Amino acid sequence: MLNRRWLTLALVFAPQVALAARAAVLSPEDRALVEAAAGYLQGLTQAKGRFVQTDARGTVTRGEVYLKRPGRARFAYDPPSGLLVVADGTYVSVVNPQLKTFDRYPLMATPLSLFLARQIHLDKGVIITGVRRAADGFTLTAQDGARTAEGRISLIFSNAPLALIGWQVSDAQGQTTRIQLNDFAPTSGLAADLFLLKDPRPVRPGRAGM
């Protein structure tokens, strides 16, 4: 059973349960969408905006998101949550002020690594398990081909203009967390310290600082 602390990580993680992946048979039109999405993500070096998260229990939280590829992202939840999730290029660190916890996980073990990579190759090392079209956009569902990152992520794009407008992560039990992006747009000059997060807890005897 997932503990309460793990539930706070729903924004960026699917629980670490191996999922069997089967690549979709892509039509030429599907491949064109995959290539367009990869090109867009490759060009999205810095961006910021707002997000709305809906977890598997229907709980809605909001906050600010900052993105700086490769490898860096920051999700700052609005009060009263105050949760802070920071990817520094190597690790994802999570501070939960309500639970007074600090956790750190390898970035490559999270679905976020699929679109924070230095080079976006959605046709290499990534298994595209589905392409779904809508009237105003499309969704690509993908999984790490090497299964370093557990879980499955669906990236949601608008058509006009082509833009990332959200994503969702799912686990083997079908539990899904959805992220909707609002006012998410390219930017520049994001400060490096936005993507650094140290353990804020005082060092106590028997516990080394991180």
Image: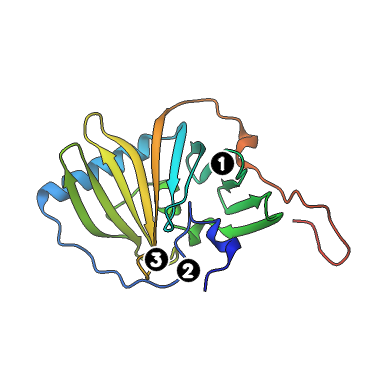
User: Regarding mark 3 in the picture, which secondary structure is present there?
Assistant: loop
The three-letter code of the residue at mark 2 reads: Gln
- How many C-alpha atoms fall within 10 Å of the one at disc 2: few (<14), some, or many (≥20)? few
Residue 42 visible to the viewer: yes
Q: Is residue 41 left or right of residue 72?
A: left
Q: What's the distance in space between the residues labelled 2 and 1, CA to CA?
A: 23 Å
The front one of 201 and 161 is 201
User: Regarding mark 2 in the picture, which secondary structure is present there?
Assistant: loop
User: Regarding mark 1 in the picture, which secondary structure is present there?
Assistant: strand
**Viewer-side label of 2, 1:** 1
User: Which of pointers 2 and 3 lies earlier in the amino acid sequence?
Assistant: 2
State the image quarter where residue 51 is shown.
Answer: top left
Relative height, residue 92 to residue 72 (above, below): below
Identity of the residue drawn at 47% across and 58% down: 13
From the top left corner, tell me how far across and down residue 68 is, in percent.
50, 37
Relative height, residue 77 to residue 27 (above, below): above
Mark 1 lies on residue: 77
Identity of the residue drawn at 20% across and 44% down: 33
Mark 2 lies on residue: 16
The three-letter code of the residue at mark 3 reads: Asp
Residue furthest left in the image = 28
Mark 3 lies on residue: 171
- How many C-alpha atoms fall within 10 Å of the one at disc 1: few (<14), some, or many (≥20)? many
User: Which of pointers 2 and 1 lies earlier in the amino acid sequence?
Assistant: 2
Identity of the residue drawn at 19% across and 62% down: 24
- How many C-alpha atoms fall within 10 Å of the one at disc 3: few (<14), some, or many (≥20)? some
The three-letter code of the residue at mark 1 reads: Tyr
From the top left corner, tell me how far across and down residue 172 is, in percent.
37, 70
